Amino acid sequence: MTPETPYWNQKIETMPREGLEEIQTRMLRDLVDRAYRESSFYRDLYRKAGVTPGDIRTLDDVRHLPFVDKSSAREAYPMGMLMVPIDRVREVHSATTPSRQMLPVYATGKDLEEWGERCARILWMTGLRRGDIIQNAFRFGLSTGGFGFHYGAMAAGMISVPASIGSTDRQIDLILDLGTTGITMMPSYAFYLGMRAHERGIDLARQSNLKVGLFGAEPTSVRMKERLGELLGLTAFGEYGMNEFLGPGMACQCLVERGMHAWADHFLLECIDPETGQPVPEGEQGELVWTWLSAEATAVIRYRSHDISRITWERCLCGRTHPRVRRIVGRTDGALSVGGYIIYPSKIQDVVHMFPEFGPFHVLIDSSRGLDCMTVRVEVKDGVRVPSRDLASRLRTAIRSYMTVTPLIEVMAPGTLAMGEGSACRILDYRRGSGRYGSSD
């Protein structure tokens, strides 16, 4: 590889579909065999379904395997999806579920190395090169957002600035003082950062060295990408990742910006009818289902993302042959992305129902200066004498402990909220668009 090539791994990134599918077939057979032998969760799941590793001979045979999603994967807690001895694990992350319980995601040294390589491909694909300074403002922690591009930058010979999210004035100072050339963060935070810079009399489009922005963890429209480009003086790219698969590094737009390339040598991607579970014709809209073919530690097989999109294997003008994920147009499970977190309304309902003082409630989601904000308006029942301020404080603490996010709480008088018949909860999303870790074409 040289600075002139547009590919980080040209042999793999431009391999014909037939070659990629041969690799996928071999990896799928090996993965199912290992999961059956080493993962108690999958062994029980496949025995109940009457499936054995010997039934998987071709890629089409993946349809014999039952689907998994967040709800069913809860049964695997804490180590049911683990395929290696625990002493081989080098890092543990987690994904959220509709309950308070998290879904552990284990990674060996090999998993971490391959994660970095996938992210290096993405950084290189968007035009970044050795010596570029990458300011990473995704979260670092159990969530995988920050770590992927940190490892990717190091693998690609770039300079990583693990700034994490927040401390916006310091972020702006770092961009100017270090000469940052690439940023990775949520698009809403990037918009806020740009607006804050303007308040300080700083025009990042003119005064910084920014040239590439990688944005994920929440939906990004074409117009928002254009606005970010104007505000920050860069080319904005959408990327896709899920914590269950170690987050960033699953798919990303290239310079052509006609969908996100999904790395077929690591993931098997299906698009199904969400009602029937049957595959839809290529190019038609359906639910994305992912299998982590190259995973060593954690088995994630036929995992329903609940994201609605389309996929195509049509060769891209950039020369890459891997399938492309088109715009994420919604979800099938009612989940919402709020500030980069996946929020399940059922979770909020469970928390509210823990308090006998509360009745119906509304969840309002809006954006202020580009940042998501969530407000829970909840009625108190007749006869409740506890001060509203105390009730609001207790509910805010409970929601934060269950869901990481901290909402605003408004305690309302009985009969204040207009509810549909038989409904105890109403979700009002005033933002444009909804989804997760996705972008537009």
Image: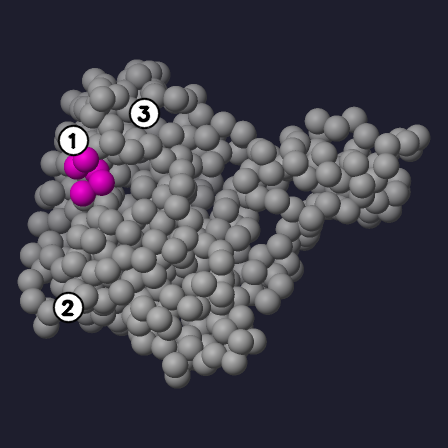
The answer to whether any part of residue 278 appears in the image is no
Name the residue at 33% across, 32% down.
92
Q: Secondary structure at mark 2?
A: loop
Please state which amino acid type lies under the numbered disc 2. Pro
Indicate left or right for 353 with 388 as reference: left
Sequence-wise, the earlier of marks 1 and 3 is 1
Give the magenta range: 109-113
Q: Which residue is mark 1?
A: 29
Judge whether residue 111 is colored magenta.
yes
Overall secondary structure of the magenta section: helix
Indicate left or right for 249 with 19 as reference: right
Locate residue 397, reporting x and y percent. 65, 36
Name the residue at 11% across, 43% down.
23
Badge 1 local density, few (<14 within 10 Å), some, or many (20+)?
many
Q: Which residue is mark 2?
A: 6
Whole-Å distance between the Cαs marked 1 and 3? 17 Å
| Location of residue 354 with respect to 291 vertically, above or below | above
Q: Which residue is mark 3?
A: 81
| Location of residue 272 with respect to 100 vertically, above or below | below
Whole-Å distance between the Cαs marked 2 and 3? 37 Å
User: What quarter of the picture does the C terminus occupy?
Assistant: bottom left
Locate residue 22, reporting x and y percent. 10, 43
Name the residue at 40% across, 41% down.
141
Name the residue at 24% across, 60% down.
159
Please state which amino acid type lies under the numbered disc 3. Met
Indicate left or right for 197 with 9 as reference: right
Judge whether residue 199 is colored magenta.
no
Sequence-wise, the earlier of marks 2 and 3 is 2
Q: Nearer the viewer, mark 2 or mark 1?
A: 2
Give 272 or 290, whichever is nearer the viewer. 290
